[in-house]
């Protein structure tokens, strides 16, 4: 009986992925009544899916943002930039920066919460659907290379922050590296990542930049 059921499953649908639980062939012989469905949990607000405790901004030093533009620097604005949104508190900016970083870097902030992932996917589209697997990131690095992964992350962060209403401003490469990081062939150490994200949030919620606002 078991062997026949397996053959039927393979011939009807090809090789398929079975999740943990009752095997296909056992379902045919089981006479037990199905358990009552559990009450569905309330879907969380996307804004509160991943609460982060923001550091005290008074303990942070605002990064230097003033520089003299040159054609070479301007040509790299697609790579070196920062974000700002008027009327935004540091706590709000920190949560936004952390969320966009997680969505763009392959780190799941939804902690195996299916309803939370569904809500994020509905709001952010395929950006949210593609996160959550360190193995997937490693495979992407091997296939596409670290440069492509860095570019992918930059574009994803830009899209996410633009969706949240942040404007983008260009910066020279040397100043950018003081409070930003790039990722490819692995994940940046958390101590470095958290320190840089804290400063990015400080800039994003600080005084309005004097420079020209860039497009998406």
Image (cartoon, grey):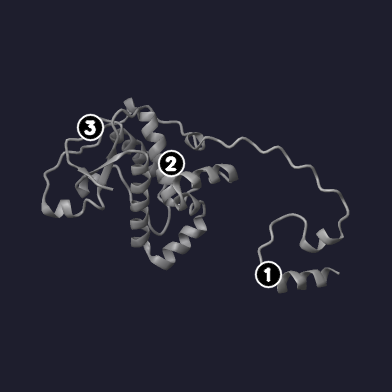
Q: Is any part of residue 40 visible from this angle?
A: yes
Q: Is residue 170 left or right of residue 189?
A: left
How many angstroms separate mark 2 from mark 1 (CA)?
38 Å
Q: Which mark is residue 137?
A: none
x, y (%) of residue 150?
35, 56
Q: Earlier in the sequence, mark 1 or mark 3?
A: 1
Residue drawn at (81%, 59%), measured in percent from left and top?
27
Q: Where on the picture, by quarter, is residue 186?
A: bottom left
How many angstroms separate mark 3 from mark 2 (CA)?
22 Å
Q: Is any part of residue 178 visible from this angle?
A: no
Q: Is residue 122 left or right of residue 158?
A: right
Q: Earlier in the sequence, mark 2 or mark 1?
A: 1
Q: Earlier in the sequence, mark 3 or mark 2?
A: 2
Residue drawn at (82%, 72%), measured in percent from left and top?
4
Tell me the crowding category of disc 2: few under 14, some 14 to 19, or many 20 or more residues within 10 angstroms, Cα based.
Answer: many
Q: Which residue matches tag 3?
A: 208
- The quarter of the image holding the N terminus is bottom right
Tell me the crowding category of disc 3: few under 14, some 14 to 19, or many 20 or more residues within 10 angstroms, Cα based.
Answer: few
Q: Which residue matches tag 2?
A: 99
Q: Nearer the viewer, residue 206 or 185?
A: 206
x, y (%) of residue 31?
88, 54
Q: Is residue 160 left or right of residue 138?
A: left
Q: Is residue 118 left or right of residue 137?
A: right
Q: Which mark is residue 13?
A: 1
Q: Nearer the viewer, residue 159 or 79?
A: 159
């Amino acid at each position: 009986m078991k062997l026949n059921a397996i053959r039927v499953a393979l011939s009807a649908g090809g090789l398929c992925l079975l999740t943990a639980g009752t095997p296909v062939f056992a379902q045919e012989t089981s006479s037990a009544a199905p358990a009552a469905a559990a009450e569905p949990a309330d879907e969380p607000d996307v804004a509160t899916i991943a609460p982060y405790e923001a550091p005290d901004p008074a303990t942070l030093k605002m990064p230097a943002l003033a520089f003299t533009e040159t054609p070479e620097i301007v040509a790299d604005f697609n790579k070196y930039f920062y974000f700002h949104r008027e009327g935004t508190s540091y706590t709000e900016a920190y949560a936004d920066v952390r969320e966009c970083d997680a969505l763009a870097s392959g780190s799941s902030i939804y902690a195996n919460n299916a309803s939370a992932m569904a809500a994020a996917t509905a709001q952010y589209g395929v950006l949210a659907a593609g996160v959550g697997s360190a193995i997937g990131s490693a495979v992407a690095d091997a296939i596409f290379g670290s440069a492509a992964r860095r570019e992918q992350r930059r574009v994803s962060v830009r899209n996410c922050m633009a969706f949240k209403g942040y404007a983008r401003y260009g910066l020279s490469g040397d100043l950018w590296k003081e409070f930003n990081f790039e990722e490819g062939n692995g994940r940046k150490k958390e101590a470095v990542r958290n320190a840089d994200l804290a400063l990015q949030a400080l800039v994003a919620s600080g005084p309005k930049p004097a420079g020209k606002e860039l497009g998406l």
